[in-house]
Image (tube, rainbow, N blue to C red):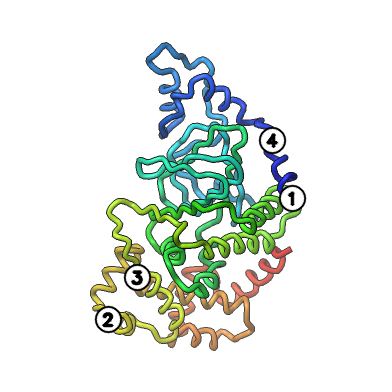
Amino acid sequence: MNREEFLQQFEPINENDLYRELYFYRPAAFEKPVESWEEFCSRFAGADGGDGRRLPSEPPTPIAAFFTEEEYFSREMWGEVNVIINARYCPAFLHKLEFIKIIYVFRGSCRFFIDGHWIKMTEGNACIVAPGVEQTVFSCADEDIVLNLLIRRSTFAESFWELLETNDGGSIADFFWKMLYHKPGGEVLLFSSSPDVLLEESVMELYEEAVLQPVKSRLVIKSMMMSIFAYIMRWDEKDVVRLKKKGDRGQYPLARYLLYMKTHLDSVSLASLAREFYVSEGYLSRYFRRETGASFSHLLMEMKMKSAAELLLKTECNIEKIIALVGYTDQSNFYRNFKAIYGLTPLVYRKKKGQAEFMRTY
């Protein structure tokens, strides 16, 4: 699909006709974000002689303070990736997401609202929103094409370890690490340079595969998302703005701690990690709890279980070897933790998940 063919998909306003009519009837009602349809209706009616007779009783598009993963990831997308077109002229409803969102301005512009401020985004700009961030987007021109690329947090965690490990670091990599492990309500990463041809092509390909293809390939969709994140990792740091929560001092060593843990699974301990980074064990323990909401031991256990699950699916190693590779000496403890995370024993997981992965690839 070339750019002209892609643009033809969005020429009709269709389901947004009502929003467009309402906007041109009373644009002042759209100037500030709102938290509910009822609040918008009240504002639209106004105190200056306006009325709400043009408004339907129910909003034309979904509106909620919080959207869950179950609401946005269908079986057709294998429950992991989705692409949603931002409704033009839709009032700016504040909301939070359980999943990760990339806002990409393919054509025109939009305004992104976070932490009490509007930020203008133009063609080629992109914005990555971490789970739990209250925000909204508003566009008010017929030519605007704003895409929301959605991915489950767990899918990002499982699929993009290699991408994070091979990156040299910097604020973009730190942002991704924080998005994986930080408690919800984190940051937003805004890319405000000129359009990137390769990124644009990847976005078009993802849309074609995820939305237009009658038979979808999970492998292709995840590969395209990988490409998009890979291009993002190559952005010039000078064009990237991290929109932090109030009070965030910007210091974030967690990425270095986690990467060290990942590469020393068979031997790392709280004591060895503290020695490596010249901090006290007490500091590390408090830091992990504050930043992630979990203890060091719990994070390490989850990391070991994810590594074991990957080895079960991608290698032919026997269980005993896998247990040793991820740093366990007590087999019963390994089996107990693995079942607590995945709900299956390692052998059953290898059999069932291996077959499922093969079937879902095509």
Instruction: Tell me the SS state at disc 3.
Output: loop
Residue type highlighted by circle 1: Asn
Rendered image: mark on residue 253: 3
Give the mark nearest the N terminus, 1 or 3.
1
**Marks 3/4: CA–CA distance:** 46 Å
Q: Are marks 1 and 3 in contact (CB under 8 Å)?
A: no
Q: Which residue is mark 2?
A: 278
The residue wearing badge 4 is: 11
Mark 1 to mark 3: distance in Å?
42 Å
Give whichever of 221, 250 is nearer the camera.
250
Give amino acid for label 3: Pro
Proximity of marks 4 and 2: CB atoms separated by less than 8 Å: no
The earlier-in-sequence mark between 3 and 2 is: 3
Give the class, few, some or many, for how many residues have Cα within 10 Å of label 2's Cα (few <14, many ≥20): few
Q: Foreground mark, 1 or 3?
A: 1
Mark toward the start of the polypeptide (3 vs 4): 4
| Residue 293 visible in the shown view | yes
Q: Nearer the viewer, residue 52 or 328?
A: 52
For marks 1 and 4 on the same chain, the one whose residue lies earlier in the sequence = 1
Q: Position of residue 172 (x, y in %)?
A: 46, 63
Dot 3, how many residues are within 10 Å of its Cα: few (below 14), some (14-19), or many (20+)?
Answer: few
Amino acid residing under circle 2: Tyr
| Mark found first going from the N terminus, 1 or 2 | 1
The circle drawn on residue 186 is none
Tell me the residue at 42%/55% (across/down). Answer: 241
Amino acid of disc 4: Glu
Q: Estimate the x, y position of residue 112 in percent, counting from the top left.
A: 46, 42
Q: Residues within 10 Å of mark 4 (few under 14, many from 20)?
A: few
Residue position for label 1: 2
Task: Determine the image quadrant of residue 48.
Answer: top left
Inter-mark Cα distance, 4 to 2: 58 Å
Q: Quadrant of the C terminus?
A: bottom right
